[in-house]
Image (spheres, coloured by chain):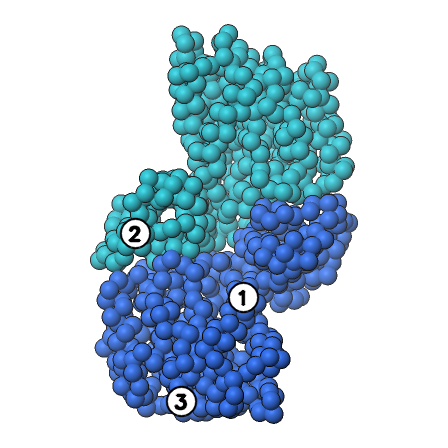
Chain colours: A blue, B cyan
Amino acid sequence: MSIRLPQGYRFAGVACGLKASGKKDIALVVSDMPAVAAGVYTQNQVVAAPVLWCRERTPSSEIRAVVVNSGNANACTGSQGMADAQRMCELVAQAVNCSKEQVLVMSTGVIGRLLDMRKLESGIEHAAQQLESSSPKFLDAADGILTTDQGRKIVSRTLELGGKEIGLAGMAKGAGMIGPNMATMLCCILTDARLEADQAHRILTTVADLSFNNISVEGHTSTNDTMLLLANGAAAEAPLSGPDEAYFTEQLTELCIELAKQIPADGEGAKHLIEVRVVGASCNADARIIAKTVAGSNLVKTAIYGNDPNWGRIVSAAGYAGPFVDVTQLQLRLNGIALYDQGEPLPFDAKQASASLRDHDVAVVELVVGKGEGNCTHWTSDLTVEYVRFNSEYTT
Amino acid sequence: MSIRLPQGYRFAGVACGLKASGKKDIALVVSDMPAVAAGVYTQNQVVAAPVLWCRERTPSSEIRAVVVNSGNANACTGSQGMADAQRMCELVAQAVNCSKEQVLVMSTGVIGRLLDMRKLESGIEHAAQQLESSSPKFLDAADGILTTDQGRKIVSRTLELGGKEIGLAGMAKGAGMIGPNMATMLCCILTDARLEADQAHRILTTVADLSFNNISVEGHTSTNDTMLLLANGAAAEAPLSGPDEAYFTEQLTELCIELAKQIPADGEGAKHLIEVRVVGASCNADARIIAKTVAGSNLVKTAIYGNDPNWGRIVSAAGYAGPFVDVTQLQLRLNGIALYDQGEPLPFDAKQASASLRDHDVAVVELVVGKGEGNCTHWTSDLTVEYVRFNSEYTT
């Protein structure tokens, strides 16, 4: 597999023994020149040490590297946790010849345990020796950030902007917003476009809101969620402006939706990706709350798992979400089959509806909640016996 | 089993064939004299026909009967559903010789299907013939409102008030706030105390807030939730006042907490009742949101199911609940074992903590979130493989 990578970045992914499985647990991304970096972070008040480190340093114009470890979230680890996050950045800084303030760090895994710094020291040193600007090393890095994920999560594309070819590549991890062996959605997007720091932050905030902020597995916001955008300008001399910025933002949004959907599709134990489309709400914010509430209902998620068109659960979830729902206008379609219209149930073939759920990996829930302009699409996974089994058997 | 029932009420519970299982599916409660009645109802915007009927008629001083059917929620049933709810009240009114406006109705079961009124007509007639003021008939009625419940849910006690013996008895149902065969928490409390209608409403609102509003199974607010309080004054000539009202409210609160806890303890597939005690929040409302969020986390619920003291999930849930949490003051105890204190993890014996969860039906989560006065206790059930199985196999 060959990927068109943005210019000026090198990658490595290695195993240092943080994971009992022996799988890769360190990822290192280095920009050959100082890059603009923007970040968006968990809204949890209980935040992990690496989030505190990054939050203080972005947006920035001076970032040289991002180091990630999986297998341990370095969250709820107190003052030792802060010292360890800083030490990780120091080790990378020594290896790539920059200052520790030019290094960002992300961690993912179990909460409340101290990092094994001895393993990390040798692991980071080893990763630094492996750095290369090549597809295999990019894939190694993408593997190094995974925890309970079944598969790696990557995207890439190229754009024509102002006569230049601009590269975009991203990696993400996550199979639960918080899960048994990890505690995090992490995402790192790289581009060789040239952006100003504030501009990068503005673009990233817009894009996150339309992509990663619209996914969930079980809705448990983690202590470590981090999404970074690095732009090193290796492919362009001038910063993006005007229509180019709009086009770049639009392309980046598409790319991030593609990447974000890989997370609930790979949700722990998931059998279906559920796409909840809400239209007709008073505003987009209302539509988002309704879509998220329907997607967050265990009864909706178990019905989809069981291929059961038990549509009363969907309509009633919309009804308790909070924002105004015009019950005289309510319409529901499931995989294109009309089930409810203007407050009255419609006759439908339950066996056919069930077969449609069984035969598709994606279940599409379409809700009209009124005549407003607000709309939102949220992606989640179904709730399965395997999810419960998996999440009930972990730390002991 | 003999229960001290409040005076002036008769009861019946029969099977009319709404449930495929042949179990009782109609309950009838009749007051020999017009009773004061207060109700609190679901906050869902999508409300079932019987809720619309009752909401218009409470508080009242003229209620003679409450009829309940299980097996069908009469929700999302449009105009036919409203006509059916009214018809149920008419049938009861004919049988007990009052007007249909003096009858309240509750329904619970699957959403979106029309009631089989032919079965209900003969069932209500049959129930009216069975009415008696006796413990066996009270238990029949309590059985008639159940759906996926494993066991009946009842409470009773007597109070001395102003030299009179006052009786209190209650019945409830619910194994999910919404479940596969039903859609509802229903509760009916009866007393022979004398209350004014507004007073009954004030007392019920206070009591509901401290009992049924603090329980959940999966947090899906139903279309049918209804809690009724009937006070027929058969044991007292004068309405309650002053300190007697305070004492009555306190006793009723205790009784309702006892009844409410039976619901998550019998939650679909539940192995543990989880008691989440939050103290130190800025106010009670904040404490309630934090307790409810911790109780609502699938990751907390699956960990308890697995007897796994995976405490990072609890702390992180408190952190994303929304209200201010003082992370420098955060303390967590699980079944009395201290796990986290002032932002630092504590050493603990994981095997011992796991054994404690395994050996107790109730898991007690104690969270200190700051130095405020706000506190709240919320009861929920764990999330088990059986819950998912049960809820994925229903309408088809």
- Three-letter residue code for mark 1: Asp
Residue displayed at 24% across by 64% down: A79
Q: Which residue is mark 1?
A: A209
Number of numbered labels in the structure image: 3
Q: Distance of mark 3 from mark 2, alpha carbons?
A: 42 Å
Q: Secondary structure at mark 3?
A: strand
Question: In the displayed structure, does residue A272 sit left or right of residue A179?
Answer: right
Is A49 left, or right, of A229 in this rendering? Answer: left
Q: Which residue is mark 3?
A: A33
Foreground residue, A375 or B260? A375
| B360 is higher (above) or lower (below) than A289 | above
Q: Is B178 located above or below residue B203 in the figure?
A: below
Q: Quadrant of the C terminus of chain A?
A: bottom left
Residue B330: mark: 2
Q: Is residue B351 visible to the viewer in this orientation of the structure? A: no
Say whether disc 3 or disc 1 marks the residue closer to the N-terminus: 3
Q: Residue at x 52, y 62 (%)?
A: A216
